[in-house]
Each structure stands twice: as structure tokens, then as C-alpha cells.
Image: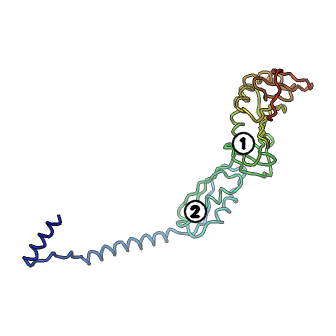
């Protein structure tokens, strides 16, 4: 290739001709630049025309704990400029910081409104003294003014909300099938687990092999407990193969009398 160009250059030198330089059609270039600039100006003018002040907040949702004025106030606090330039993500974040708001969908509603669709939190359980958990095991209120007493009570150290809720969700359905109602789950500071059944019956699972002990309670102990629920104070599952029952009469029935409950719980 290099040799070819050298030969070509020699021929051009001998013939006295030069390679013509590219010619720029400045008229066409000027027209093109003018068209682009016109479109940019038109787009800017259109945005300015559409960027009207936000005059209305349209709120939709089924409200029990959140009021529409709270939503409107959260929107007004973060809206700066007109409808076209408002930051919808910022508006949504402001709304979702309100207690009892689970999620919000925010949209522009031309020519001068913001439309907000709000979904409230649904309390699935109490947490410790005055907290509330949703169905995902998330603590969405730490100090609620009103805590529904009919909700199950879940207890545990800070940060353990999800694992306590997980055990509750795994156990409640299976216990209902066995004729028992689960009203609470407790995880103490040492890592020991305890279930609370209707009538205040405690099921001690301890710290070790918790899933296996729960499975054994459902399979072996739950038929007895379901039949004599009113007579029982607690069921202790902290055995290798069996369990013991604490009766209201303060007498105990040991299903595995040859073993002693392990000191893990």
C-alpha cells in the first residue's frame, strides 16, 4: 500500500497535478446549524410553556391511618419550580417517609397537577413494647401511638425483626392445621426461642436445633396440646428425642424421663 501511494505521488508530481482539497459547502452547513438551533429553541420554549406551577395534588388510595392533607404537605415541601421540572423521585421519597405509608407512585398530571397513588402499611404483628411490623417483617413504626392488641406479639433484640418474623410465618400456618393458634414468638438476648400459644401456653425451643425441635413439636406434641390446651402451662422441647409438659396442677409429664433438658435455653 505504501509503495502504491509513492508511485501515485510520483505520477502526480510528473504530471504537475495536485490532489484537490475537500470543499465545504458553508451555505448547507449554515442552514443545518440553523435548523438544529431552531429545534433547540423550540424545545426550550415548549418546556417553558409546559413548566407551569404545580397548583393541585391529586391523592388516591384507601386511607385508614394516613390523611390526604399529610400527603399534600409532603409534596409541597419538596416541589420547586414547575410541573415539567419537578423531581418525581424526590416527591416520592418525601411521601414514603410518612408513618404508615408503604409505597407511593407519583406522576405528572398535565397541565398543573401531581397525581399520587398511596398504599398504606398493613400491620401484621406487634414488635416489643410499641413497634409494628408489616408482612415482610419490616419494622415500620418503632413507637406507635396505638398498637392493636389482637396482633401477635413478636419480641427480640434490635435488628432481629426479620428472623423472628420468619419463624412466626413458618410456624403459624402449620400450627393452625394442628388446631393451635400462635400468638407470639420470642427471641431472647442469649439466642433462645420460645413460642406463645393461645391460653398462654409456652413452647420452649431453646437455642439449638430450633427448626428440628419445632418440627418435633408439631409432629409429636401438638396433638396432646390441642386436646388439653387449658391444662398446660408449657411444653419443653429442649430434649434430644422427647419433650416434657408443665401442667397447671404443677405436676410434669416427662415423655423422655431418661434425659435432662439441655441448658441451652
Query: In the drawing, does residue 64 fall left or right of residue 199?
Result: left
The label number, if any, that marks residue 257 in the structure image: none
Q: Are marks 2 and 1 in contact (CB under 8 Å)?
A: no
Instruction: Point out the frontmost of discs 2 and 1.
Output: 1
Query: In the drawing, does residue 162 fall left or right of residue 196?
Result: left
Q: Residue at x 77, y 28 (%)?
A: 180
Q: Residue at x 77, y 21 (%)?
A: 223
For this orientation, the residue located farthest to the left is 15
Mark 2 or 1 closer to N-term? 2
The image quadrant where one finds the C terminus is: top right
- Which quadrant of the figure has residue 256? top right
Question: Observer-nearest residue: 62 or 16?
Answer: 16
The label number, if any, that marks residue 124 in the structure image: 1
Q: Position of residue 160 (x, y in %)?
A: 72, 45
Residue to which mark 2 is pinned: 113
Q: Residue at x 34, y 75 (%)?
A: 34
Q: Position of residue 216 (x, y in %)?
A: 73, 25
Query: In the drawing, does residue 68 fall left or right of residue 186?
Result: left
Specify whether residue 151 is in view: no
Q: Is residue 222 above or below residue 61?
A: above
Q: Is residue 215 above or below residue 11?
A: above
Amino acid at each position: 500500500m505504501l509503495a502504491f501511494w509513492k508511485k501515485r505521488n510520483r505520477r502526480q508530481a510528473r504530471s504537475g497535478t495536485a490532489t484537490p482539497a475537500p470543499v465545504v459547502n458553508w451555505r448547507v452547513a449554515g442552514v443545518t446549524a440553523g435548523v438544529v438551533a431552531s429545534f433547540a429553541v423550540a424545545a426550550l420554549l415548549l418546556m417553558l410553556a409546559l413548566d407551569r406551577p404545580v397548583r393541585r395534588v391529586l391523592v388516591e388510595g384507601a386511607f385508614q391511618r394516613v390523611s390526604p392533607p399529610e400527603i399534600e404537605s409532603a409534596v409541597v415541601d419538596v416541589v420547586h419550580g414547575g410541573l415539567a421540572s419537578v423531581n418525581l423521585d424526590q416527591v416520592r421519597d418525601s411521601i414514603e417517609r410518612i408513618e404508615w405509608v408503604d409505597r407511593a407512585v407519583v406522576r405528572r398530571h398535565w397541565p398543573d397537577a401531581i397525581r399520587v397513588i398511596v398504599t398504606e402499611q398493613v400491620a401484621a404483628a406487634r414488635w416489643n413494647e410499641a413497634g409494628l411490623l408489616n408482612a415482610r417483617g419490616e419494622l415500620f413504626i418503632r413507637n406507635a401511638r396505638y398498637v392493636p392488641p389482637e396482633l401477635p406479639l413478636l419480641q427480640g433484640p434490635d435488628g432481629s425483626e426479620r428472623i423472628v418474623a420468619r419463624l412466626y410465618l413458618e410456624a403459624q400456618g402449620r400450627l393452625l392445621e394442628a388446631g393451635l393458634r400462635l400468638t407470639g414468638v420470642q427471641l431472647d438476648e442469649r439466642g433462645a426461642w420460645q413460642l406463645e400459644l393461645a391460653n398462654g401456653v409456652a413452647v420452649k425451643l431453646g437455642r439449638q436445633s430450633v427448626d428440628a425441635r419445632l418440627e418435633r413439636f408439631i409432629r409429636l406434641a401438638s396433638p396432646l396440646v390441642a386436646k388439653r390446651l387449658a391444662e398446660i402451662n408449657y411444653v419443653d422441647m429442649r430434649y434430644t428425642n422427647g419433650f416434657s409438659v408443665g401442667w397447671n396442677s404443677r405436676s410434669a409429664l416427662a415423655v423422655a424421663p431418661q434425659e435432662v433438658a439441655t441448658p441451652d435455653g
